[in-house]
Image (spheres, grey):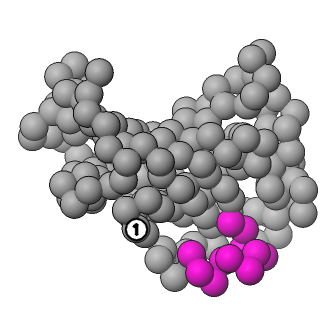
Amino acid sequence: MGKFHESIKPAHQEFIEKQHIFFVSTAPLNPEGHINLSPKGLDCFKILSETEVAYMDLISSGNETSAHTLENGRITIMFCSFEGSPNILRLYGKGFTVLPSSEKWATYAPHFKIYPSTRQIIVAKIDLVQTSCGFGVPLFDYVGERDIHFEWAEKKGEEGLKEYIKEKNLISLDGLPTDLGKS
């Protein structure tokens, strides 16, 4: 089952900072709704305190995390060791979205490299940290980040990105509004 902690300890932070990828999971309250699980990279994750984390989120084809955290706040963030000693670390908590138009943007944005295609920052208040063995996680070599998103965003341009958000990021797969959709 693993070990549980009420906050992020220095050893947890050291492990998290070495990872190149993490996974974010959220779900709607409706039992018929779709669970969302998204991989993230780009060194966009920051530990702000023992109980608060955030990540910079780019425009993409959906916005489930924003919709689910707006509805119920539940969020789980998972890190896996793909090299060295096996380990899995999960952060459980309540999340919320911070938009560029929000007063909170000035508090959170300075922690990140903000791109023209940055959509929002997802913040999570952590109430439980779990570590487990990770013996079943395979070994992988990190090669690097992809440039495809940034090439796509540059081709879209500022107006094209705004239109894309209107088309793809205002409502979840299950019809829930996102923070972008309520503003």
**Residue 121, x across and y down, in percent:** 61, 63
Q: Is residue 22 above or below residue 43?
A: above
Residue under pointer 1? 49
Left or right of residue 76: residue 26: right
| Residue sitting nearer the eye, 40 or 121 | 121
Left or right of residue 145: residue 68: right
Quarter placement of the N terminus: top left
**Residue 147, x across and y down, in percent:** 46, 58
Quarter placement of the C terminus: bottom right
Q: How many marks?
A: 1
Amino acid under disc 1 = Ser
Q: Is residue 102 above or below residue 23?
A: below
The magenta segment is: 98-108
User: Does the image show residue 29?
Assistant: yes
Report the residue at 36% width, 53% height from top. Answer: 7
Label 1 packing within 10 angstroms: few (<14), some (14-19), many (20+):
some
**Residue 142, x across and y down, in percent:** 23, 46
